[in-house]
Structure formats: structure tokens, C-alpha cells
């Protein structure tokens, strides 16, 4: 499987340096970033090619992995799908725009392509998907991050946001993809609280789901990426796991 990457920042670096060709024949071959120097640096590490023109890699890939930002999803995803190429989207918040979601869904069906959304920086997504249509009544997400990861300079704990996921991803497009992931998994605009806390050094996500099945709770304390504290290591690892799963004969979980 030949892969092209959009966005050559922290997540792309982790994925690229963790994948070798022997991993189910995964070949990360092309790199695109509006900062061409970043693309060239990562391409040199992987023995791949940095492209100046995004269209150039669409001629020779089986899958595109987006590791950039929601605006990049909106700019490039339609073109990827129109070429019948599968796509992994890391900036899942872009799909909280319902019209855009439907546009991508229609393009994917028309051109026989697949859109993959990794579980990202949370655990428990399989459970949420399992109960989504079976009496799921309520899902809440409480996220707690350090001031550095949220670009804040404060010395006391503060609630930055409390409301629906659709609003959270607009206010914090680079920080709260997990809210979009959960919402899309359970097909509800979930309730979200975002807290900045100078006492924490990890990105903490607590999920509570209630319904006819009972109650389940998960808590994830993610170490942030050294290169980008806005990003959790687990987000990159979930994409690596997804890539490696495509050619497996036996798959565990959803």
C-alpha cells in the first residue's frame, strides 16, 4: 500500500518514523506540506518524495493520510475522494460540519473510496459505537489540559468552554478533535467541558456514557508530543495501528 501524507508536523513525524515497509507492505512515499521545507525534511527521513503540487501524489497512491488541520481536510479531501483514493482523516473536527460530512460521504460512495477516522487520543470508542443505536441516552466529555497545550498563560484552573461538541471544535479546532470523534461515533452532538489546569502535565480526557446498557466511564491521561503539546502521543499511535490493520487477516475490535 502506497501512502501520501498531508501535513508534515508532529503526528506525521511519529507515524513516518514508526512505520517500516515490512509493516504489511506500507510504503509512505509522498509528503505534502505548505511549508515545503518540512515536507522535504520528513521525506528525507523516510526515503520518500516531497511534492510541491498536491495533485502530483494523487497519481501514485492508494491512500492519503491527513495530519494537518481542519482547513486542510476541507481543501483537499474532496479531491482525494474524487480520485477514488481512500483517506485517513486526523483532523476529525472538520466533519462536524454536517453539509461537508454529507458531501464527503456522497463523494466516497460515488467513487468507491473509504474515509477512515482513527480513535485518536481516547479509549472506549468501540463501546460507544456498540451502544450508539441501543439505548444510549447521554455522553459527556471532560477534557483537562495544561495552559501550554491550549496556548494560555494562566496560573489557576479555569473552565474555558462548556457546551456542545459542534461549538467546541469551532472554538478549539486544533485541540478537541476527540469531541468530534465521539460525536460521530454515537451520532450525537455530545456535551463537552474543556478545563485548563496549570497543575496537569498530561492531556486528560474523561468520557461518561449512560443508557439502557448501564454506564461506562473511561479516563485517558495522554503524554503530549514533545514537538507539539497540543497533540497527544496516542493520536499518532491510533493512526499507526489503523494503517497496520488494513492487511491483517484477523482483526480484534471494530
Image (tube, rainbow, N blue to C red):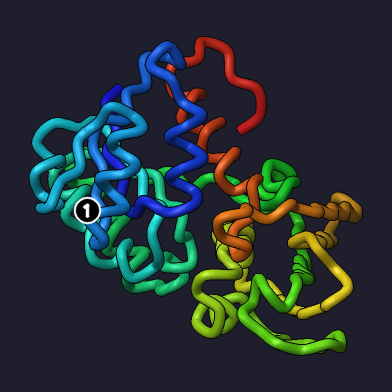
Does 78 appear above or below 112?
Answer: below
Which of the 4 image quarters holds residue 77?
bottom left
Q: Quarter of the image holding residue 187?
A: bottom right
Q: Quadrant of residue 202?
A: bottom right
| Marker count (numbered) | 1
Q: Nearer the viewer, residue 124 or 240?
A: 240
Query: Where does the image place residue 91, in percent across and percent down from the top left?
Result: 45, 60
- Residue toward you, 145 or 98: 145
Instruction: Determine the residue positioned at 60% across, 69% down.
Output: 176
Q: Position of residue 120 (x, y in %)?
A: 60, 49
Where's the N terminus, which quadrant? Answer: top left
The C terminus appears in which quarter of the rendering?
A: top right
151 with respect to 153 (left or right): left
Q: Residue at x 37, y 64 (%)?
A: 101
Does residue 69 appear in this view?
yes
Q: Residue at x 53, y 45 (%)?
A: 118
> What residue is shown with label 1?
107
Horizontal side of 111 relative to 157 (left or right) equals left
Amino acid at each position: 500500500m502506497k501512502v501520501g501524507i498531508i501535513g508534515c508536523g508532529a503526528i506525521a513525524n511519529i507515524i513516518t518514523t514508526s512505520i517500516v515497509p515490512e509493516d504489511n507492505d506500507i510504503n509512505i512515499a509522498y509528503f505534502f506540506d505548505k511549508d515545503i521545507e518540512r515536507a522535504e525534511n520528513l521525506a528525507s527521513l523516510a526515503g520518500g518524495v516531497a511534492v510541491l503540487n498536491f495533485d502530483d501524489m494523487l497519481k501514485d497512491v492508494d491512500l492519503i493520510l491527513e495530519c494537518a488541520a481542519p482547513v486542510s481536510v476541507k481543501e483537499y479531501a474532496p479531491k482525494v475522494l474524487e480520485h477514488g483514493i481512500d483517506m485517513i482523516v486526523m483532523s476529525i473536527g472538520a466533519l462536524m460540519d454536517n453539509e461537508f460530512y454529507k458531501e464527503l460521504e456522497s463523494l466516497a460512495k460515488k467513487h468507491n473510496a473509504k474515509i477512515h477516522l482513527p480513535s485518536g487520543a481516547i479509549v472506549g470508542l468501540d463501546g460507544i459505537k456498540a451502544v450508539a443505536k441501543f439505548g444510549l441516552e447521554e455522553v459527556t466529555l471532560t477534557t483537562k489540559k495544561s495552559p501550554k497545550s491550549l496556548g494560555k498563560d494562566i496560573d489557576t484552573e479555569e473552565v474555558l468552554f462548556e457546551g456542545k461538541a459542534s461549538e467546541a471544535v469551532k472554538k478549539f479546532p486544533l485541540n478537541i478533535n476527540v469531541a468530534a470523534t465521539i460525536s460521530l461515533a454515537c451520532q450525537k452532538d455530545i456535551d463537552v467541558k474543556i478545563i485548563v489546569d496549570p497543575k496537569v502535565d498530561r492531556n486528560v480526557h474523561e468520557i461518561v456514557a449512560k443508557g439502557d446498557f448501564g454506564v461506562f466511564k473511561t479516563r485517558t491521561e495522554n503524554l503530549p508530543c514533545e514537538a507539539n503539546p497540543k497533540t497527544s502521543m496516542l493520536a499518532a499511535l491510533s493512526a499507526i495501528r489503523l494503517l497496520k490493520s488494513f492487511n491483517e487477516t484477523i482483526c480484534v475490535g471494530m
